[in-house]
Image: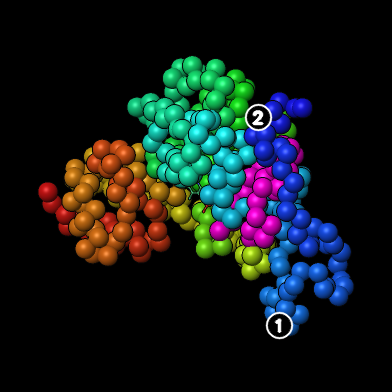
Amino acid sequence: MTETEKLVRDNIRKLIPYSCARDEYDGGEGIFLDANENPFGHLNRYPDPYHRKLREAVSRLKGLPVENIFTGNGSDEIIDLCYRIFCNPGSDKALIFHPTYGMYEVSAAVNEIEVIKVSLDENFNLNISAVEPYFKDVKLKLIFICSPNNPTGNSMNSNDIEFIIRNFKGIVIIDEAYIEFSGHPSFSLKIMQYPNLVVMQTFSKALGLAAARIGIAFAGQEIINYLFRLKPPYNISTINQAAALKKLDEISESRDQVKKIIEERNGLVKSLAKLKVVEKIYRSDANFLLVRVMDADHIYNMLLEKGIIVRNRSMMINNCLRITVGTANENRRMISELEKITL
Ligand SMILES: *Cc1c(COP(=O)(O)O)cnc(C)c1O
């Protein structure tokens, strides 16, 4: 048994996956009388459970083999699948760096997994000396690293990330939902080197396809195979697979949008810096800004009254709002409302 397989829950290792009709026969043309579908109409057939066309397109784009690519119903499904592959409910643990994306904790709770929360340091960087003692804990199976991090916006130091991957014997999941806005290389290039590494990306942010719910995992073939064995057979609809393929066909449009969003982000930093109510704008590698203001609750409500909705993160980080970068017009309107607020 490989080191990775030893980390897999016993019941999952023994699992005989559901074999759907399209598993038993996936040849091209034919008279399909095997899946109890309605023979009439359009969208009457089940989707490809292996998302082959989509994964081949992702493979061409990223320069990684199809066998190392999994596509799921959003990154959120991939997070849940990782818990179910590696963590025994009621006994195993996961570690997250606080403050970060809320789904790691919610998904842990659903799966009855204890979460160890290690605080990021004062600049929201990884705190290696604080996490290192946990490497010995044999119940600790997953470490989540979000880079660029939500809601702080910064990328984590790549040497720190690599230190964790090398020294932790469990699975390290790097969530790169915002990587396209950062200019940093993806850790997906290192999956061949580290069998305990899972890198997640998504169609929801830079690719502008949040409605279609498509997440990507890059990992060694063993982990990819377990993700496929565990997932519901038809987890991504034909419509959504087609929408994602179309997005990749028109990737230059998304790239232009990313450039525009980054320009707008830089413009927003300048406009926000001039406002009295703004105390600090954190450096962002993402499509949002974390901004510390004088009275987050008040400002949040004032904006809301004007129909401008930002995220109030002050429960997580004192007096901080998370502001997504919108269109030039949307950003201008938000700034002009903020200019009117006096405390
Ligand atoms: C938005 C976001 C995602 C995307 O999740 P999907 O389920 O793919 O839409 C993943 N991780 C983080 C940190 C995010 O902020």
Q: Residue at x 56, y 62 (%)?
A: 212
Label 1 neighbourhood size at 10 Å, few (<14), some (14-19), many (20+)?
few
Which amino acid type is shown beneath numbered disc 1? Gly
**Range shown magenta:** 213-236
Instruction: Locate residue 297 relative to residue 48 in the image: left or right.
Output: left
Q: Position of residue 58 (x, y in %)?
A: 69, 52
Q: Residue at x 86, y 67 (%)?
A: 28
Q: Position of residue 66 (x, y in %)?
A: 76, 48
Q: Quadrant of the N terminus?
A: top right
For residue 176: magenta?
no
- The mark closer to the camera, 1 or 2, is 2
Whether residue 240 is situated above or below residue 266 in the rendered picture:
below
For residue 231: magenta?
yes
Instruction: Locate residue 18 relative to residue 176 in the image: left or right.
Output: right
Which amino acid type is shown beneath numbered disc 2? Leu
Q: Residue at x 24, y 58 (%)?
A: 303
Q: Which residue is identified by label 2?
A: 7
Q: Which residue is identified by label 1?
A: 41
Q: Position of residue 256 (x, y in %)?
A: 55, 58
Instruction: Locate residue 47 relative to residue 147 in the image: left or right.
Output: right
Between residue 56 and residue 110, name the one nearer to us: 110
Provide the secondary structure element on which disc 2 rests: helix
Between residue 156 and residue 111, name the one nearer to us: 111
Which callout, 1 or 2, points at the residue further toward the start of the chain? 2
* Picture disc at residue 80: none
Q: Does residue 256 appear anywhere in the picture?
A: no
Q: Does residue 12 appear anywhere in the picture?
A: yes
Q: Position of residue 27 (x, y in %)?
A: 87, 64
Q: Residue at x 28, y 41 (%)?
A: 315
